[in-house]
Image (spheres, helix red, strand yellow):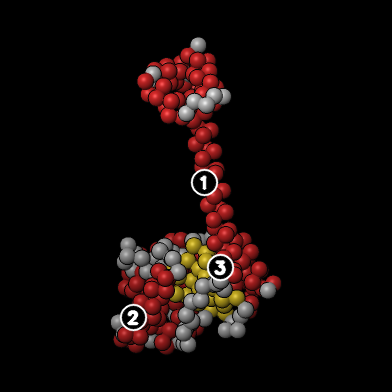
Amino acid sequence: MKFKYLLLVFVAFSLSCTSKDQLKKTLEENPEILTNVIDKHPKLFLDTLNKAVEKAKSEAREGQAKAQTQAMEDEFNNPKVPVIEDGRVIFGSKNAPVTIVEYSDFECPFCTRGYKVVNEIKKAYGDKVRVIYKHLPLSFHPMAEPAARYYEAIALQNHKKAEKFHDLIFEDQGGLKSGKEKFLDKMAKKAGANLKRVKKDLQSEKVSKVIEADMAEAQKYGFSGTPGFLVNGVSVKGAFPFGHFKKIIDRHLKK
């Protein structure tokens, strides 16, 4: 009876000119209406509540997806323009029509996922895509900045050796965490770099400025976590699967 009474109360209010304030007042003055119904029909109450929660989540996801789609459309029309300095290491063809700028952290496990996806992209698109690796070492990854410094110090010697060092780190990220600087020394040697010269250049102004500029640019474009990407100026925030990148790249190539 209580449940039927509660329904009648809501129907009456919904079919009349009674205000929401009056309904609220009635329930506040007679809270037992709700509590008694919940006590007698707990399963019905929980089922209804769970449906409402799932509906709210679904609507939130739809809203977020629409916002992301609109943001992407805005960036296709008004792409972000990262700085690509002369002398920067470029993975792939320098004249590729699609440029992927990656803001990454050598110690971040999600960046390893990003590394694997980028390899898929390079394999699928060949000379149509080039990748510029930029640095966003996160404060809670103590070996991220040292690894970034090794990478840029090696790049001062030879770009191909820097590329090899980059790959070696992401292929054995666990070794970086456990071996720390000794591991970085080992990988620098394995990449073919002159370790003595690397050590000399690690704290150089040139290396420091590159990393500082990368971090500032990442912040400017709204990247606070890693990995982050700009695909011809269109943002991808996170280690999204290959298919997500493919949609963006194919659209650029059709232009």
Element on which disc 2 rests:
helix
Name the disc covering residue 99, or none. Answer: none
Q: Distance between the residues labelled 3 and 1?
A: 23 Å
Residue type at mark 3: give it.
Glu
- Where's the C terminus, which quadrant? bottom right
Q: How many marks do you count on the picture?
A: 3
* Camera-nearest label, 1 or 2: 1
Name the residue tied to disc 1: 60
Q: Between 66 and 8, which is closer to the camera in this rendering?
A: 8
Give whichever of discs 1 and 2 has the lower sequence position.
1
Give, as a three-letter code, the residue at label 1: Ala
> Crowdedness of circle 2 by 10 Å Cα count: few (<14), some, many (20+)?
some
Say the numbered circle drawn on residue 208: 2
Q: Quadrant of residue 220?
A: bottom left
Residue 196 occupies which quadrant of the picture?
Answer: bottom left
**Mark 3 or mark 2: whose residue is earlier in sequence:** 3
The answer, for residue 243, to whether it is visible in the render is yes
Say which label, 3 or 1, has the lower sequence index.
Answer: 1
For marks 3 and 2, give the CA distance.
30 Å
Judge whether 193 appears above or below 108 on screen: below
Q: Mark 3 points at which residue?
A: 75
Question: Disc 3 vs disc 1: Cβ atoms closer than 8 Å?
Answer: no
Residue in front for this viewpoint, 112 or 225: 225
Amino acid carrying label 2: it is: Ser
